Image (cartoon, rainbow, N blue to C red):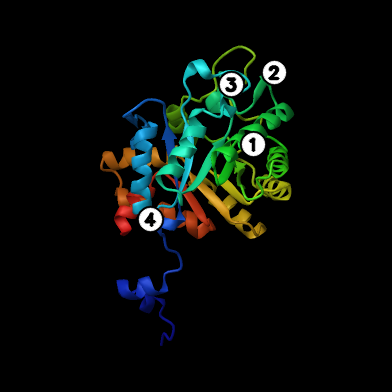
Amino acid sequence: MILRRNRRLRATEAIRSLVRETSIAPTDFIVPMFVVEGHGVKEEIASMPNYYRFSLDLLQKEIKLLWAMGLKSVLLFVKVPEHLKDNKAAEAINPEGLMQRAIKTVKDACPEMLVMTDVAMDPYSKYGHDGIVGNGIIQNDATNQVLAEISLSHAVAGADIIAPSDMMDGRIFDIRSLLEQEGFHNTGIMSYSAKYASAFYGPFRDALDSAPVNSNNIPKDKKTYQMDPANRAEAIKETLMDIEEGADIVMVKPGLCYLDIVRDVRDAVTVPVAVYQVSGEYAMLKAAAEKGWLNHDAVMMEQLLSIKRAGAHMIASYFAKDVVKLIS
């Protein structure tokens, strides 16, 4: 005689929903937003179907829509015109730069929206790298000084949380120190702590035109600063160092292929853990669904549930609007 029948708690949707261990809500999401110069611009990104770059006027409308949907956090990225790019990202600290204006636009449209900002040099770099290039390598310490200045400029513009995505050693300490020195005690830092040198970033680099250039004496990829996908223990070391230096939230990027890292990090830290479900994860599902090979909504929800089940407190995802429409 069987006394314990686990299937009793799977018999109906009512009981399944009652005992469900993991759920997805609009407040789980950070919405990545791509911003461009111009007016009336809403450009679909070719490798990211149904995802767009917005000019500031249409960004304002999109922010209001997101808030009405219950999506309360955005992560801003900017596509910088080529003529403004150089090796030291001078445009990144322009008080009237595109990022600084985008922050103000979001806050004007919806003051309560949580504004996170990408702190990185690659959108501003003529070489497509996350740091200053010198003598054929990325100059770590000089880059950190620039990243700190970029972070300060975002804080001055009104950013709530800055998100350094570069993977330079020691940059969180330099950023936190400058923010404290300048009185921005409540500006948070969400560090890309375990960011891997992944092949899943291709569509994102299309969106911002930020891939490394193919040129003599310029690193061909980002493997000297982003993490080796083969490594696991290193992620904990990187994350704990960022927390010691002042990070308030830590991130694992990408998501789906790194759920073991998400769980390891969640078990090792006491700060919130974010996961970035990256552009390649988005694009491959969109492509498979378009071909009729996968059920878009079912796979989307399964992926996101797996990320949250692995330990994510929050998820940066291009599927955020799709999910909210589905679950509302």
The residue that label 4 is drawn on is 70
Q: Quadrant of the C terminus?
A: bottom left
Q: Closer to the N terminus: mark 4 or mark 3?
A: 4
Residue at x-position 69% and y-position 37%: 171
Left-right relation of 142 to 288? right
Element under disc 4: loop
Callout 1 touching callout 3 (CB < 8 Å): no
Which quadrant of the structure image shows residue 60? top left
- The Cα–Cα distance between marks 4 and 3, rounded to whole angstroms, is 41 Å
Q: Position of residue 54 (x, y in %)?
A: 37, 33
Residue topped by disc 2:
134
Question: Number of labelled discs?
Answer: 4
Circle 4 packing at 10 Å, graded few (<14), some (14-19), many (20+), is some
Q: Amino acid at mark 4?
A: Gly
Disc 4 to disc 1, C-alpha distance: 31 Å
Q: Residues within 10 Å of mark 1 (few under 14, many from 20)?
A: many
Residue 203, image x, y percentages: 43, 32
Q: Position of residue 100 (x, y in %)?
A: 52, 33
Dot 1 lies on which element? loop
Circle 3 is placed at which residue position? Answer: 220
Q: Residue at x 30, y 53 (%)?
A: 325
Residue identified by numbered label 1:
167
**Closest to the observer, 164 or 230:** 164
Residue flagged by tag 2: what amino acid is it? Gly
First in residue order: circle 4 vs circle 1: 4
Q: Does the CB distance between marks 1 and 2 fall below 8 Å?
A: no
Residues under labels 3 and 2: Cα distance? Answer: 14 Å
Q: Is residue 32 visible?
A: no
Tell me whether circle 3 and circle 2 mark residues in contact (CB < 8 Å).
no
Where does the N terminus fall, quadrant-wise? bottom left
How far apart are labels 2 and 4 at the CA level?
45 Å
Q: Residue at x 42, y 29 (%)?
A: 207
